């Protein structure tokens, strides 16, 4: 549920009185969880106790309460449900309800999400739709307001979030802060709009994003307002950020995996200033590896004390984000709990949300609305002018620099190349691994097309196209021929978003993403399987990359060095 | 300063840019503190570093900045200035500026104060006057809104703060929460007004007050909303409260001294949930023993790691109360700092507030307004109907129970006595240590007088009167004769509040407290000396008590067992 209610009593006086009465044993509790071992993240103890719940909150943690219902938790550990400190739910490729279907049985009870992708496509109405979609789920979805839409003037999102729009959204219930301030060059230059956005957060948090920043630049960044960071990849970097006053979110995503490198940061003195974040986990990772439970499992396996690990994944995160009433098993806290079979392996037996059992043995038991009908306002976001293949023509003089991808990284190199020329135009040449990279503006039917060369995708035939193209999410395509590029683009445009593999005029694979061109409206297991099939189809065209679509999605991102192709053309940073 | 600004940048864009520029060494900082050892409460480290300050905030903590001004801190420790988590500044007997004059040189940079005493006298306008008086001081004074005025229906304060008034004040800038919820019997009974007051705190904190509460009652109390407590006197009590989710404020006041008993609570696992509070420190203690510095000194002497102790007195308190931007030496934080000559002895050499030196070598260097003209709206609060000594008559049948004081405690006993009767009336009998205890309603000239007998004050002659009489602060007097009681009451009434000692018709001592009848308008050193003289004068009349006036102030407090005399008469609880 999105509403970040303060941890207070008496919006409902009757519920408040019932909670008191249940603690005093004057009335039975709604639910008593009996005989488990409470993971007390406040005292650091494990202790056998019953948990009495009334009106969705914990009334008491003690011994032997009467309850209308009860759960036998003998042999189980009772922990606060887990909290992801920073995640883009769009990275799952599924609608928020399907995200919940995957993570709630994993013990996740809350996420702080930055709807940066949907905001690039659909602005505040897009964020609003996601917020509404999250409202009745058995998970607290707290929002930050994207601070950097567009990522830079060099790409063209569906909308722009200026300081006024940011300030407006910061006042919405369910919003807990300003989203990650990625534009650190602008910040360090004292950009007034950035200053206004940071200021408008008021008493809310200001999430940071400062990869590799250190020394003076890090100090300036922290001094300017951001209060956290999840981008550390090296121990020394994380330590410097902690010293600089930033809450350190240790990230363990699908591909950005920093946990084991950063874990030595956590000591008796520093643990209160560290928590966990997944940032980006795709549907496959969520279904097969897990969510915060997976991060905890790895952390504990690497030697972190389980109670401390759980504290970092619950109370620390809640306290940082001011999610009052979340993150502890104590009277007055929301009854958002997870029952574990085993502490070290974080083996989740049951998830409880607002005092109700919502998942058991890895399966959601709460009913969720089908995603098939979700978010009508976020459909039909693709508006392209008719694209002709002659728009993909590239003059040889404009083709002397190519984007070179680096497997497993989103940074690229700008490399000098001698283009292969045919009929006076630079063309794709699979034999030399020089492919065409195309970006088509997809919101306002401007007909704007950017074209360049790329090395490293390794396709021997065919083309890939995607409406997931950070951050503006125009259409991006890579291919060995203009015809197949055109075909792939047509497929994703006609389906109002998606991923497509085309070869020799045939559609080899297609995953429609009708919600904002970013998300499927199908069940997460389905999407995970189809996505894997699609990546396999792309590899079958000759690409040596593990995740050709995963990498393609970053080929238009105008803020990461060194070279990109956006709808405005080749960009060298 | 009372405004609790969020820890943000750009209300002033220019200041925000200057801070960035100073961190980047593009412009000189306003002030650089060079060569000291930073007490980094976030990382737990001590490390030599320079602190660059611009626009009142820390721009960077590093090495070798250029600065318009600089301070040589070689051999000094640089810590965040100290924060008192819960204090009634009225207990100092001086106006807030004089309180600041005493504590700022001791390194205090912020206090969270519950203006409970002034609110009993003068309601929200009284709280407003204190808030205004604190606005320009070199200390952050954050306020909670008194939740229990009156303390009970059995006493008559100057005003009543109902749920609407509480809700109004909770919206004021500078207010950080609901004040200590002392009415735990009412809370446990589910009183609707208490529920409304707790609910109206919204996202703000709700301070607790639950002396001796344990088991079911403690769980019910915590479940109902309070989030902290400073009333633990025993280790097991404090541990139970921490487990129950309450932030444990370890109190060390003038007379309520719990530090050494509770210190074993602080472990690697629990320290983030503990901080310090003084609650009540009188002027004498503040001047001669100190404030948070004194608590730290004792804690460190008792074995607590100095960095951890300072963390508990700074960052933990700031984080609990959501005092954003306070409590750490890190970029972006307010430049509220203390320079220590020695860590273990907490020997304060200098206090810096908002980037300016405000105290040095134990003396305030900042200029403060004189208290002599302070708070005109809080003067003339005493409105008594003409009091005649026949109003002190006590029928023998109404004098069979006496209040018995217990030296050093505020609880009393109700004891059965055989009154001494003269001319048909029960009278004071110093030979039997049975004195008269009188309370006179002092706000609305109702002429209401309560009379009873008290044992334990031990006066052999004369009488004491005081307008400090928790919580309603009517006039309370104790004496050996109706004439001297009347004389003492007349003195404090005529001076619009104060303390008086009268014997055989002569004024032996008089400390005027013209501000709300609670506070002097004189310098704190003067008041400390005069208060000591007055207690000595009271003892010279035969009282064996250490602090006869200190104890007299609690003789009308209607919520502490077992017996009291309020303006409504003898009360046995």
Image (cartoon, coloured by chain):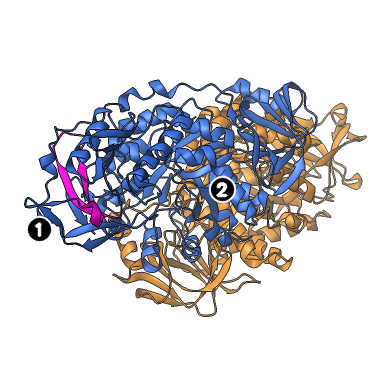
Chain colours: A orange, B blue
The image shows residue A509 at horizontal and vertical percentages of 69, 55
| Residue at (69% x, 66% y) in the render | A300
Q: Give the secondary structure at mark 1.
A: helix
Q: Is residue B365 left or right of residue A461?
A: left
Q: Are marks 1 and 2 on the same chain?
A: yes
Asked if residue A161 shows in the view, the reply is no
Asked if residue A55 shows in the view, the reply is yes
Establish if B206 lies above or below B263: above
- Disc 2 target residue: B295
The image shows residue A100 at horizontal and vertical percentages of 53, 59
Q: Chain of mark 1?
A: B
Q: Residue furthest left?
A: B424
Establish if B14 lies above or below A86: above
Q: Counting other residues with Cα less than 10 Å from the Cα at mark 1, is it few (<14), some (14-19), or many (20 or more)?
A: few
| Residue at (86% x, 32% y) in the render | A399
The image shows residue A201 at horizontal and vertical percentages of 53, 35
Q: Quadrant of the C terminus of chain A?
A: top right
Disc 1 versus disc 2: distance between alpha carbons? 49 Å
Q: Earlier in the sequence, mark 1 or mark 2?
A: 2
Q: Nearer the viewer, mark 1 or mark 2?
A: 1
- Disc 1 target residue: B397
What span is in magenta?
A: B429-456
Q: Residue furthest right?
A: A418
Q: Chain of mark 2?
A: B
Q: Give the secondary structure at mark 2.
A: helix
Q: Nearer the viewer, residue A405 or B554?
A: B554
Q: Is residue A342 left or right of residue A10?
A: right
Asked if residue B440 is among those painted magenta in the image, a careful observer would answer yes
Q: Counting other residues with Cα less than 10 Å from the Cα at mark 2, is it few (<14), some (14-19), or many (20 or more)?
A: many
Q: Is residue B480 left or right of residue B214?
A: left
- Any mark on residue A293, and which? none
């Amino acid at each position: 549920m999105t509403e970040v209610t303060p941890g207070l009593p008496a919006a409902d006086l009757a519920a408040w009185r019932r909670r008191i009465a249940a603690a005093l044993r004057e009335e039975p509790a709604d639910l008593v969880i009996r005989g488990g071992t409470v993971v007390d993240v406040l005292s650091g103890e494990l202790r056998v106790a019953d948990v009495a719940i009334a009106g969705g909150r914990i009334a008491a943690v003690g011994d032997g309460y009467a309850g209308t219902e009860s759960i036998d938790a003998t042999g189980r550990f009772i922990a606060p449900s887990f909290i992801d400190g920073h995640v883009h739910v769009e990275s799952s490729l599924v609608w928020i309800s399907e995200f919940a279907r995957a993570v709630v049985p994993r013990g996740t009870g809350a996420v702080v999400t930055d709807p940066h992708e949907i905001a690039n496509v659909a602005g505040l109405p897009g964020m609003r739709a996601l917020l509404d979609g999250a409202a009745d789920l058995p998970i607290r979805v707290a929002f930050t307001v994207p601070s950097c839409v567009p990522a830079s003037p060099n790409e063209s999102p569906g909308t722009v979030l200026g300081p006024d729009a940011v300030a407006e959204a910061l006042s919405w219930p369910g919003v807990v802060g300003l989203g990650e301030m990625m534009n650190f060059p602008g910040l360090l230059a004292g950009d007034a709009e950035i200053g206004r956005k940071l200021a408008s957060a008021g008493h809310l948090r200001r999430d940071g994003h400062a990869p590799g920043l250190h020394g003076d630049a890090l100090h300036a960044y922290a001094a300017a307002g951001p209060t956290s960071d999840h981008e550390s990849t090296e121990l020394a970097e994380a330590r410097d950020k902690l010293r600089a006053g930033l809450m350190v979110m240790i990230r363990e995503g699908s591909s950005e995996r920093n946990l084991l490198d950063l874990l030595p940061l956590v000591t008796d003195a520093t643990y209160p200033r560290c928590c966990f974040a997944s940032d980006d986990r795709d549907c496959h990772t969520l279904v097969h590896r897990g969510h915060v439970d997976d991060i905890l499992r790895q952390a504990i396996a690497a030697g972190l004390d389980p109670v401390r690990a759980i504290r970092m994944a619950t109370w620390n995160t809640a306290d940082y984000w001011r999610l009052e009433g979340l993150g502890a098993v104590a009277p007055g806290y929301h009854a958002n709990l997870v029952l574990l079979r085993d502490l070290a392996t974080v083996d989740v037996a049951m998830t409880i949300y607002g005092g109700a059992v919502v998942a058991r043995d890895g399966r959601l038991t709460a009913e969720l609305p089908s995603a098939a009908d979700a978010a009508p306002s976020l459909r039909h976001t693709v508006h392209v002018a008719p694209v002709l293949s002659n728009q993909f023509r590239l003059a040889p003089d404009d083709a002397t620099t190519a984007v070179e991808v680096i497997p497993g990284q989103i940074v690229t190199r700008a490399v000098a190349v001698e283009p292969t020329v045919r009929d006076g135009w630079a063309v794709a040449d699979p034999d030399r691994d020089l492919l065409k990279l195309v970006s088509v503006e997809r919101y306002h039917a401007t007909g704007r097309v950017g074209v360049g060369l790329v090395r490293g995708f390794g396709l021997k035939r065919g083309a890939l196209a995607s409406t997931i193209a950070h951050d503006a999410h125009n259409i991006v395509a890579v291919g060995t021929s203009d015809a197949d590029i055109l075909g792939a683009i047509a497929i994703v445009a006609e389906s109002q978003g998606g991923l497509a593999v085309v070869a020799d005029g045939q559609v080899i694979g297609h995953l429609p993403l009708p919600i904002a061109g970013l998300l499927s409206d199908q069940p997460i297991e389905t999407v995970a399987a189809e996505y894997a099939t699609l990546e396999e189809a792309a590899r079958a065209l000759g690409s040596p990359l593990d995740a050709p679509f995963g990498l393609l999605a970053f080929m238009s991102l105008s803020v990461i060095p060194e070279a990109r192709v956006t709808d405005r053309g080749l960009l060298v940073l």
